[in-house]
Amino acid sequence: MLRFLAARIAMLVAALATAALVIFLVLEILPGDPAAAMLGVSATPETIAALRAELGLDQPAARRFLRWLAGLVTGDLGLSYAYRVPVGGLIGERFGVTLPLAVLAMLLAAGIGIPLGVAAASRANTRLDAVLMGVSQLGLAIPNFWFGLLFVLIFSIGLGWFPSGGFPGWSAGPGPALHALILPALALALPMAAVLARITRSAVIEALGEDYILTARAKGLSRAEALVRHALRNALIPVVTILGLQFSFLLTGTVVVEGVFALPGLGRLLIQAIGGHDLMLIRSLVLMFAGAAMAVNALVDIAYGLLDPRMRPA
Amino acid sequence: MRDPVRHTVFQWGLFRGAFLAILGVAAGISASSPAAAQARDRLTLCQTLEPPILDPTAGAAAAIREVTYDNIFEGLVAFDRDGRIVPRLAERHEVSADGLTWRFFLRRDARFHDGAPFTAADVKFSFERALAPDSKNTQKWIFEPIAAIATPAPDRVEITLKRYTADFLEGLAWGDAVILSEASAARAATEPVGTGPYRFGRWMRGDRLVLERNPAWWGGTPPIREAILRFISDPQAQVAALLAGDCDAHTNIGAQEAVAQLRADPRLVVAIGRTEGETIVAMNNARPPLDDLRVRRAIAMAIDRNLVNEGAISGFGTPIGSHFSPNHPAYLDLTKETPFDPRAAKALLAEAGHPNGFTLALRLPPPAYARRGGEIVAAMLKEIGITARIEPMEWPQWLERVFRNKDYDLTIVAHVEPMDLNIYAREDYYFGYSSPAVKTALAAAKSARSEAERKAAFEAAQRQIAKDQVNVFLFMLPKITVARKGLEGLWPHSPIPAAPIRDLRWN
């Protein structure tokens, strides 16, 4: 198991280093100048050159790349070209919105989706199953931001229970912050819950047909006991895979929902950075997104190993 | 696998209309909902764009001025809501008969937010900083005529000019000419210290910035104690925040199509004003076939600016026929110069040797007026046989390819700076236009000794630019202000990008 872990982590580091190089090169080729983006249409070429020098943009690309790599190791990601504050701090602030939002959405999705899936599987091909699957079909068909708009209409504008958007910050206390995150988290969670419900249902139904369930029942376990102790555990493998994929998607894929709720999250930070050609910020953000996706994949692989010893390499 | 972002963005477009329709219903329900009780000295003012930094002397973004102008920072003089020049840190000034020596008499009761007194040395420092070779000031023309700055007394500044400059004082009212102190200027981007009625409180980037009333301000005590500036870029989210009562006002909403519905809400007041944003279909005058006046005229005659106005910004723009703001006394209405006439346009195109038309690249920056307007313009050009290939791009790419490298045929853009007619005299500007007549007229405006002389020079330049059909002049971008009933003092127009809190009060 230890060798498996070490190999998986070495692979992760190699992939990250490759990603860093590719991201840097692609952004270098992209047309645009951070200094010109900052100074607009009236600035003279000398003024733009002065800002380029101040930002260190007049240095050769190789040197800037090496400085960034060194920064990645030491944790000093440099100053954002547009905001003139440390990139690490900017990303950290936004993490404080996106991460709780993603976790909350995951919990809601799992809390809604998995029980519904199990319920549908245990009553497969009954009227309850048909209704649950019909509802989940609807959840799949409606994109998350549309739920967001609907929630704003009902709960913010109509009932006045929640703010229509914005984020008061954790400094205002966990109450107001969570209050601001509930609607967007729910909007993100519903389509995910629909996917999870369907995956859980088919995985549980498949597991219930396996021989070991018959054995378990023959040993005297009740249907419910066999379902929870044997079928569900095996059915969780595809569910965990989907959850992992969706979590890495949640870190990046919340852009539109962040827009609907005017939340200062990572997705909107990336959009703003692209709008200002803030290469310093874009490259660290993109690498972080890539890194998060890779790390989640690695964790899912490791979780497989824990859930099913057959998947551990010999 | 399908691209989730593109997929959702596409669907977003489909849902927009439906969303706005349902908003009306929700607003009906909400009449009974408890509106957040609002303290009479607090205010949440919503704006579309967030400033990247807070130093107006080191960045071009209009949002920097919308946050800081006459709030945190003050100049010697300022523009008021009507675009008139009014005193600020200079109580009064005198000009020598030859117009070359400006004597400013400074306020003695002004202090910076860090407690340091404001003196003549701060003026000298600020202007010399703007003039320095490593200056990041985006409007260096304001300071360029300065030959010397003397400080005969702590409350006196004497500026000598290299030559007579008619718009020198006007330039000093811009946000780019505000006064910073030497002790704090280096940190102004993130911790601005000015002399204004509000000092920088805190900034949660991406969401809000708080301005606190400056108890030591020389001008007394403005009614609002604390102003929360919230930044909401999504047009639908702006409407939702107004309807939910999360914003007391929005300085310029992007969802023009929601105006009728916001007007119907008895809690809100909508005002349609003007910005200084001349919106044009810019043409690359240096590139064939656009170097032919007949072709440019044909393109202008093929475009119905009222229809573009209607389709792109719900008809709230003010039509223009040259590159000049109707807010200015020297404005000439030249909208009739090139009437919409596709048939005549087609004939003109044939006369220019293009009976079968040609293909042009139409490169569009992100704003809705450009992207929506671009679709309409392309359809209109198709009618006279011109194929416009639409290429949407982000601002940095637009700045590099269209603006700097002049690699374009057509683009749609709003020139938002006030009094920017002088760009038509700039060599190597992205229009690719050069006219001795316009240069002469604009030089005459710069050296005009009287208002009448200056007005005549501006009129001559407007006429020549319209006659040469340098660009297709569409409309002035609107400023659509929405405020909760009882909030007074918002600027209806924006003669300069600004949102002074000192003018606001709850009634």
Image (cartoon, coloured by chain):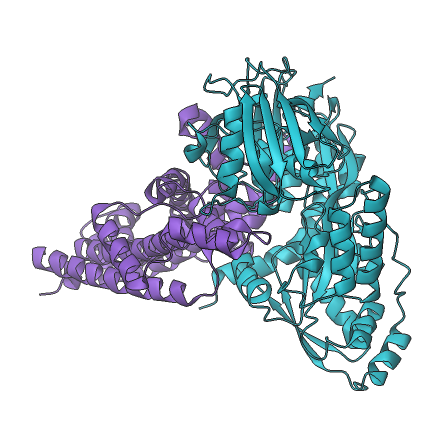
Does the image show residue B446? yes
Residue at x 50% of width, y 26% of height: B121
Image location of residue B62, percent across then percent down: 60, 43
Above or below, A282 relative to A158: below
Residue at x 67% of width, y 65% of height: B431
Asked which quadrant contains residue B23, the reply is: top right
Q: Is residue B53 left or right of residue B407?
A: left
Q: Is residue A280 left or right of residue A33?
A: left
Q: Is residue B167 left or right of residue A43?
A: right
Q: Quadrant of the C terminus of chain A?
A: bottom left
Above or below, B309 relative to B54: below
Does the image show residue A209? no
Q: Nearer the viewer, residue B382 or B126?
A: B126
Image location of residue A166, percent across then percent down: 53, 35
Image location of residue B363, percent across then percent down: 63, 67
Letter of the chain shown cyan in the rendering: B
Q: Nearer the viewer, residue B51 or B376?
A: B51
Residue at x 46% of width, y 51% of height: A273
Q: Nearer the viewer, residue A5 or B340?
A: B340
Chain A, which colour? Answer: purple
Q: Quadrant of the N terminus of chain A?
A: bottom left
Total numbered labels placed on residues in the image: 0
Asked which quadrant contains residue B239, the reply is: top right
| Residue furthest to the front | B98
Above or below, B150 relative to B295: above
Residue at x 41% of width, y 39% of height: A97
Image location of residue A153, percent across then percent down: 64, 39
Q: Is residue A268 left or right of residue B253?
A: left
Asked which quadrant contains residue B377, the reply is: bottom right
